[in-house]
């Protein structure tokens, strides 16, 4: 059994190590690229959402490298994601690929099925072993999120922000040749040290932007055209409203109550969206308010074309912008999104935020409050 | 007397008879927006977020049309109409989208209907709605009983083969089978899609009437009974968690497997996220069963001439196929 899974930002790093700890052979898909998207677009229904297309691309590229089993998580509505696996399976069948799908559906769909899938996919010999590997995997997820976070912060403050890119680039290259959890952790520690050694300019007062919107688009840099990196080089600190760590905290560690931060976001969103709308639509509205309260200069919503929950959120965001006085920009992403236009919009938005900050300062100066 | 506005869009086509009787029994005047037209469409396009699907935009237009004419607007928040099932995310958030996209609205009655976990909540939503309008328990109960009766009559008409557009017109008049000439019909076609795509005659340019005047028997998902829909949608490898998705897929699968139709026209509206999944499921099934399938995606700019040509070509193809098959069997 050679396992693969779709990409979701840096999760593959922890995922690979976790499965290897359990003695499984793992073939992660090559990093998402133009080619991934091309393959995905070619074989997916035209109007499916962007994450689906990338998934298909990932699978095919992994299968070509020898993978024969695909691990994914499922859901049962209300969004399209819940039906991804069925469509994906029939597409791969049509193409004549002989692969097995193991789908982890939520627990209310049947405990037994979930248990079975876990045993099959994870090669569990004992529960102790599983818990050990699970804890280890969790540690790796937190660590790799931390590295992403650290690199984003460093970029904004660094004297030479491109040094950060170099470190991260070589980190990602090394990951591919690293086998097993311990070695991965060692690699991560080294990267952490090199990041910390990057020279910074403490006098900088970076603009702060919260990235909100659809989870996949926030987490996977290829899909959002590396928004963190781009903003980082413009000297902006970026915080993502959704990360793998936050997801696990909300859905696994604090099951079934949910994490404090996410519940806070629901509470903030409540006057605008009282109920769930699928995907992360409610969180998007809540996060926008959350960031405004935390003193961020602005928020950017990432919306993969046709994404249903985010469209609901988008129609409410102008009101949030007004009620909380925080600039909001929505970026719609699909396979046609061009680098140049994207960059222009980011630059214009950062300009706007800088001007706004300046104005506020002047007001203070003029009216003395 | 207080006036309640009911926008002619989205779930209007599923539940209007129920709502109408209910409010009328309570002695409340209802005002339904006029049929979709150019003006309503344009109002919707300008007030709704660009990225939304056509039916949601049209719905915005209907609300714009009504907002100065009524005291309340009825937009129930329909979360779930069946156990463990959901509606589309845009349906879940519809009252919110309207509230924050359209200015100067009268109060919205957004009774929540959520039967995902249990059916008891349904009664509560009904009482809440009635109470908002200042009615007492017994009035509400009586009104709902009556409404339910006429709604059953409506469903009965549908299962007898009356197309819902017609059923809404006649449901309280004499029973009349629209497809009465079924024996003389040359072809039977399933028109499948969301109720608000297939019964909004402006949006789909009278597709169903066109087919019927061509001597074609039309079957739509609402005309298949629930039991069949459940049975056939259970054949999917994974539980279909959208109630409307289940209706579309289940009804199409049943007609395909029972070989009751000569072809399928899937009517989809531009920007529909759910359809990207459903079309794929239905099309695959149709191809396997060798039943002609065509997808008609409608958007703001779709021209009538183009649609007509495509439908004519599709009908010709089916007729030709039928003749061909007959020839072969005659020779054998
Ligand atoms: S949340 Fe958006 S991107 Fe994700 S499955 Fe739903 S529609 Fe697609
Ligand atoms: S099901 Fe499709 S058409 Fe209906 S609201 Fe959802 S996206 Fe729009």
Image (cartoon, helix red, strand yellow):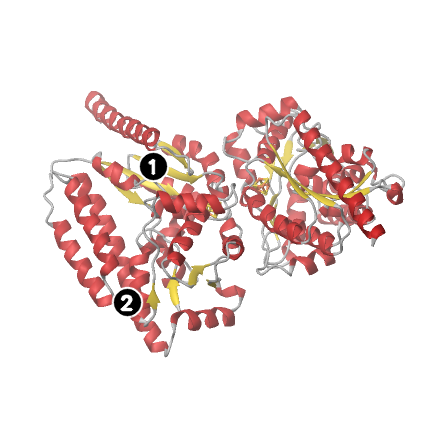
Mark 2 crowd level (few <14, some 14–19, many ≥20, 10 Å Cα): some
Q: Which mark is on residue A299?
A: 1
Image x and y of residue B248, in percent: 66, 49
Distance between the Cα atoms at labels 2 and 1? 33 Å
Residue B326 vs residue A324: left or right? right
Q: Chain of mark 2?
A: A
Mark 1 crowd level (few <14, some 14–19, many ≥20, 10 Å Cα): many
Residue A239 vertical placement versus B66 (above, below) = below
Which is nearer the eye, B164 or B123? B164
At mark 1, the secondary structure is strand
| Residue that appears at 19% across and 39% down | A156
Whether disc 1's CB lies below 8 Å from ligand 1 is answered no
Q: Which residue is label 2 attached to?
A: A136
Q: Residue furthest bottom?
A: A126
Image x and y of residue A5, in percent: 39, 58
Examine the rendering and report whether any part of residue B1 can be seen: no
Q: Residue B18: which quarter of the image?
A: top right
């Amino acid at each position: 059994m050679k396992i693969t899974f779709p990409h979701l930002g840096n999760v593959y790093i922890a995922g690979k190590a976790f499965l290897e700890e359990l003695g499984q052979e793992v073939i992660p898909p090559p990093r998402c690229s133009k080619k991934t998207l091309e393959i995905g677009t070619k074989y997916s229904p035209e109007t499916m959402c962007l994450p689906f297309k990338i998934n298909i691309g990932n699978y095919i590229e992994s299968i070509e490298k020898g993978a024969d089993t695909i691990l994914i998580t499922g859901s049962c509505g209300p969004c399209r994601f819940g039906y991804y696996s069925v469509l994906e399976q029939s597409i791969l069948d049509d193409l004549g690929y002989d692969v097995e799908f193991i789908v982890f559906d939520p627990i209310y769909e049947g405990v037994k099925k979930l248990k079975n899938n876990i045993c099959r996919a994870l090669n569990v010999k004992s529960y102790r072993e599983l818990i050990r590997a699970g804890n280890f995997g969790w540690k790796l997820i937190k660590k790799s999120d931390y590295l992403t976070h650290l690199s984003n912060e460093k970029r904004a403050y660094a004297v030479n922000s491109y040094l950060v890119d170099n470190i991260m680039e070589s980190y990602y290259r090394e990951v591919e040749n690293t086998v097993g959890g311990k070695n991965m952790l060692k690699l991560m520690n080294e990267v952490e040290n090199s990041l910390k050694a990057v020279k910074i300019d403490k006098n900088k007062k970076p603009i702060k932007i919260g990235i909100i919107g659809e989870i996949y688009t926030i987490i996977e840099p290829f899909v959002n055209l590396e928004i963190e990196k781009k903003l980082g080089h413009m000297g902006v600190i970026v915080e993502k409203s959704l990360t793998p760590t936050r997801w696990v905290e909300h859905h696994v560690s604090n099951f079934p109550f949910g994490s404090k931060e996410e519940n806070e976001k629901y509470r903030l969103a409540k006057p605008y969206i009282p109920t769930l709308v699928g995907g992360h639509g409610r969180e998007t509205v809540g996060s926008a308010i959350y960031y405004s309260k935390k003193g961020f200069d602005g928020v950017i919503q990432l919306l993969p074309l046709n994404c249903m929950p985010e469209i609901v959120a988008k129609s409410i965001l102008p009101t949030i912008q007004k009620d909380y006085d925080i600039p909001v920009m929505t970026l719609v992403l699909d396979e046609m999104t061009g680098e140049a236009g994207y960059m222009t919009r980011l630059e214009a938005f950062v300009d706007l935020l800088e001007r706004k900050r300046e104005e506020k300062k002047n007001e203070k100066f003029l009216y003395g409050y | 007397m207080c006036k309640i506005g009911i926008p002619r869009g989205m779930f209007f086509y599923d539940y209007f008879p129920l709502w109408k009787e209910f409010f009328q029994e309570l002695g409340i005047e209802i005002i339904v927006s006029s049929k979709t037209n150019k003006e309503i469409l344009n109002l919707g396009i300008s007030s709704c977020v660009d990225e939304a699907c056509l039916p949601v935009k049209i719905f915005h237009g209907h609300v714009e049309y009504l907002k100065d004419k009524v005291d309340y607007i009825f937009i129930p928040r329909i979360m779930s109409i069946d156990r463990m099932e959901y509606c589309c995310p845009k349906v879940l958030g519809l009252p919110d989208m309207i509230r924050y996209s359209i200015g100067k609205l009268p109060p919205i009655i957004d009774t929540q209907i959520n039967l995902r976990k249990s059916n008891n909540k349904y009664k509560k939503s009904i009482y809440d709605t009635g109470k908002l309008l200042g009615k007492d328990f017994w009035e509400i109960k009586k009104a709902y009983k009556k409404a339910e009766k006429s709604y059953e009559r409506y469903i009965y008409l549908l299962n007898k083969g009356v197309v819902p557009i017609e059923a809404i017109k006649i449901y309280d008049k004499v029973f009349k089978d629209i497809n009465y000439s079924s024996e003389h019909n040359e072809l039977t076609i399933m028109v499948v899609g969301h109720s608000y795509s297939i019964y909004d005659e402006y949006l789909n340019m009278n597709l169903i009437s066109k087919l019927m005047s061509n001597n074609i028997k039309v079957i739509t998902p609402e005309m298949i009974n629930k039991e069949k829909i459940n049975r056939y949608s259970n054949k999917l490898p994974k539980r279909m968690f959208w109630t409307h998705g289940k209706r579309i897929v289940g009804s199409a699968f049943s007609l395909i497997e029972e070989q009751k139709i000569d072809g399928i026209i899937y009517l989809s509206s531009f920007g529909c996220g759910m359809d990207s999944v459903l079309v794929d499921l239905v099309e695959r099934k149709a191809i396997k069963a060798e039943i002609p399938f065509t997808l008609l995606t409608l958007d703001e700019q779709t021209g009538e001439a183009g649609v007509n040509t495509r439908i004519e070509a599709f009908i010709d193809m089916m007729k030709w196929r039928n003749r061909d098959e007959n020839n072969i069997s005659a020779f054998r």
